Image (spheres, rainbow, N blue to C red):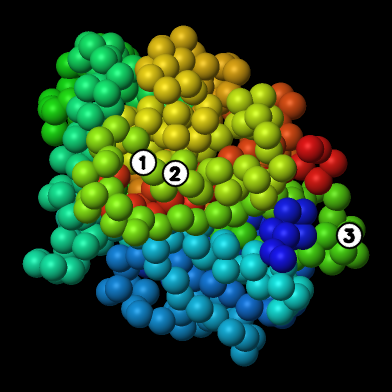
């Protein structure tokens, strides 16, 4: 009988690059930048790493279709290195591979690294790999803003939310993230934006305006994981336990059976339910202290609050406007600025989220540090609401809950 991986694996080192328009470097240099920070943080030597996973979703030109660029860029000794891709959950998928290898006893120390250089594509949003069927599988309802605009409309219709209330709540999501991003030297965008500017911005896909959409950037993030016993042998007291990591993929139900009204994301609900069970979380609203969720669009963060059980059905707009998820709120969300300020280099985003909660759990976040952070959640959503992959991870202090 499967028992899960709660407390069987710990993160002993993490690294994250500066995100942004990194024209000056290639993917390999970004990998090295994130890895060197993680390695220094871990107290490990390079030759102690026994397996590695590379997450890269669209960077075929720079990274290629194998994991060889990771092995060569980091000068890893002759170990198994695997490339993974799972849409916008790619970074978390790489982390899951490393965690599962250690939990299974296949190795003592494993590495996960996610990287993407989207600016090099010259594309204004997520680049389209092909035309026709393959692209339809990636984003089956046209553009990403168009797909998530439909989520906003369906949510408002189901819950009877007035258009102006929804728009103001979405604007608050963006305003809050931009306020947080100012304090993060690794964020791409670090300027506060007023509510008026957000509300008056050009429309991209009604009701999503310019500031409701995350930007395009380059970046990388890295994690080194091991067992609690190895961490103790290293003399590491400042490590973070993996409580749960779950990924759920759509089986087509949303598109095929006419039962889904388009107002929520089923895969987030399923992945979070499994993650809470694995982590022993019975009341996420009181037990989760901080969250990083997939705010590719402001409405996504809004709906995710309900899908994760952090807001009641139909109440997320009002919780947001009440400041529940602000930096000084009851449950801070996107304390680092989120995708709104970092952009979304796909392979890196999930590990970048883990980097922020790892930093918060260890009390290293400087001016954005929150008090009494013992349990944290990260969430990725890949694809469109109707055809998605969702990842939920829960991390905790070793001496915490």
Q: Secondary structure at mark 1?
A: loop
* Label 1 crowd (10 A; few <14 / some 14-19 / many >=20): many
Q: Position of residue 325 (x, y in %)?
A: 51, 22
Q: Quadrant of residue 169?
A: top left
Q: Is residue 242 above or below residue 111?
A: above
Residue holding disc 2: 268
Asked whether the residues under the numbered discs 2 and 1 touch, taking CB atoms below 8 Å apart as contact, a structural biologist would say yes
The residue positioned 67% from the left and 50% from the top of the image is 278
Dot 3 or dot 2, earlier in sequence: 3
One can see residue 240 in this view: yes
Say few, some or many: other residues with alpha carbon within 10 Å of mark 2 (under 14 / 14 to 19 / 20 or more). Answer: many
Return the x and y of residue 72 as percentages of the image width and height. Answer: 51, 82
Mark identifier at residue 265: 1
What is the CA distance from the residue labelled 2 to the residue labelled 1? 6 Å
The x and y percentages for residue 374 are 73, 35
Counting residues from the N terminus, which is met first, the one under dot 1 or under dot 3?
Answer: 3
In the visual, does 286 lie left or right of 73?
Answer: right
Quadrant of the frame with the N terminus: bottom right
Q: SS class of the residue under badge 2?
A: helix
Distance between mark 3 and mark 2 Cα atoms: 34 Å
* Residue 151: % across, % down: 25, 34
């Amino acid at each position: 009988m499967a028992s899960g991986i709660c407390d069987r694996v710990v993160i002993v080192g993490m690294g994250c690059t500066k995100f942004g328009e990194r024209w000056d470097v290639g993917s390999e240099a970004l990998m090295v930048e994130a890895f060197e920070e993680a390695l220094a943080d871990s107290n490990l030597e390079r030759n102690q790493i026994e397996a590695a996973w590379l997450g890269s979703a669209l960077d075929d030109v720079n990274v290629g279709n194998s994991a060889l660029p990771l092995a060569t860029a980091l000068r890893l000794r002759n170990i198994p290195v695997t490339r993974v891709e799972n849409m916008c959950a790619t970074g978390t998928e790489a982390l899951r591979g490393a965690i599962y290898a250690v939990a299974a006893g296949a190795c003592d120390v494993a590495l996960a690294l996610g990287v993407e250089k989207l600016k090099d594509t010259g594309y204004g949003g997520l680049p389209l790999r092909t035309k026709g069927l393959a692209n339809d599988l990636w984003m089956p309802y046209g553009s990403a803003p168009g797909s998530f605009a439909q989520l906003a409309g369906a949510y408002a219709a189901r819950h009877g939310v007035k258009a102006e209330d929804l728009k103001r709540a979405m604007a608050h999501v963006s305003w809050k993230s931009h306020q947080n991003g100012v304090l993060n030297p690794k964020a791409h965008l670090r300027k506060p934006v007023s509510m008026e500017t957000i509300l008056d911005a050009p429309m991209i896909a009604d009701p999503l305006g310019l500031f409701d959409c995350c930007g395009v950037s380059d970046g990388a993030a890295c994690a080194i994981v091991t067992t609690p016993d190895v961490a103790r042998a290293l003399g590491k007291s400042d490590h973070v336990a993996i409580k749960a990591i779950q990924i759920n993929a759509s089986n087509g139900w949303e598109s095929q059976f006419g039962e889904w009204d388009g107002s929520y994301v089923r895969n987030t609900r399923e992945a979070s339910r499994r993650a809470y069970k694995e982590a022993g979380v019975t009341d996420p609203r009181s037990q989760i202290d901080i969250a990083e969720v997939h705010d590719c669009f402001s409405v996504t963060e809004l709906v995710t609050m309900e899908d994760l059980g952090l807001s009641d059905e139909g109440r997320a707009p009002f919780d947001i406007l009440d400041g529940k998820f602000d930096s000084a709120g009851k449950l801070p969300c996107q304390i680092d600025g989120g995708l709104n300020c970092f952009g979304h280099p796909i392979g890196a985003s999930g590990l970048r989220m883990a980097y922020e909660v790892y930093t918060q759990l260890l009390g290293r976040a400087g001016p954005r540090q929150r008090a009494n952070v013992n349990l944290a959640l990260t969430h990725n959503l890949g694809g469109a609401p109707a055809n998605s992959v969702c990842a939920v991870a829960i991390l905790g202090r070793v001496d915490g809950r």
